[in-house]
Amino acid sequence: MPEFEFERDRAYRLLLDFFLGGDFDTDTSLSERKLAETLHMGRMPIREALRDLSRDGLLESRPGRGTFLRPLSVDDLREIYEVRYALEGMAAHLAAQNGLTEELAAYDAKFKAMLASPDDYELGAVYDLGAEFHLSMFRAAKNQHLYDIYEPLRLRFRIALGLPKHYDHARVFKSVEEHIEILDAIRAGDSLRAQQLVCRHLAAGLDVRTRIFEKLKDYAGPAAASA
């Protein structure tokens, strides 16, 4: 890989990590110079990485104002979840058909340890392990096209919603139980049940996040509603 492409890819990954931290909101304009200084990189790879992020639907250009993280609406959220039902349900279905991988099997002990001692884990770490489980499920599905379609959608959702600011303790640990059920279905080779459990898991997540949106809208007041 040419050096410039390597730097652009590195900038892309660093920007994702920065945005996923949840400390950057959708009302703040993205400055190439400030991002380059923050990430200790040249402005050119930052500029190219921002273009790539825009292409992937994570950023938007507002004429006369600059480039911003793309916000989500309730309708966006619903549509994204409708796509996730299809993609992640199929990933679980294929993973169960292919058989449990060592990578997936390793989650069983991790999830059960979290349920046994919930106070020992930060909510962010629990959520991140769940997100990694979903990616591992896609790898176990052994369908690269499926994964390539899913990845930008997942990133847009996580960044735009700013999830680290809105963790719900009960829901995060309930999702751990749901992941164990999905894992058991994959281990049993029950592709239909694995698919159904993933869709049920996502439906519960959609319900929680829809309520988050409603709370945020109520908190922001009439100005946000008219924006």
Image: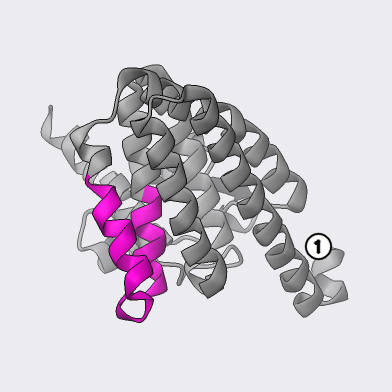
Q: Residue at x 45, y 25 (%)?
A: 190
**Residue type, numbered disc 1:** Ala
Which element type, helix, strand or loop, lies under badge 1?
loop
Where 119 falls versus 111 (above or below)? below
Where 66 falls versus 37 (above or below)? above
The image quadrant of residue 136 is top left
Magenta stretch: includes residue 53 = no
Main secondary-structure element of the magenta-colored stretch: helix
From the image, which quarter does the C terminus lie in? bottom right
The image quadrant of residue 36 is bottom left
**Label 1 Cα neighbours within 10 Å, binned few <14 / some 14-19 / many ≥20:** few
Residue 52 visible in the shown view: no
Left or right: 160 as drawn, with respect to 112: right
Q: Position of residue 100 (x, y in %)?
A: 28, 30
**Is residue 114 or residue 50 the one in the foreground?**
114
Q: Position of residue 152 (x, y in %)?
A: 46, 37
Left or right: 79 as drawn, with respect to 126: right
Q: Position of residue 56 (x, y in %)?
A: 48, 36
Instruction: Specify the segment rendered in magenta.
Output: 106-131
Q: Position of residue 164 (x, y in %)?
A: 47, 69
Where 22 falls versus 94 (above or below)? below
Q: Residue at x 72, y 44 (%)?
A: 78
Where 131 falls versus 212 (above or below)? above
Q: Residue at x 32, y 75 (%)?
A: 117
Q: Residue at x 33, y 71 (%)?
A: 116
The residue beneath circle 1 is 227
Magenta stretch: includes residue 114 = yes
Residue 164 visible in the shown view: yes
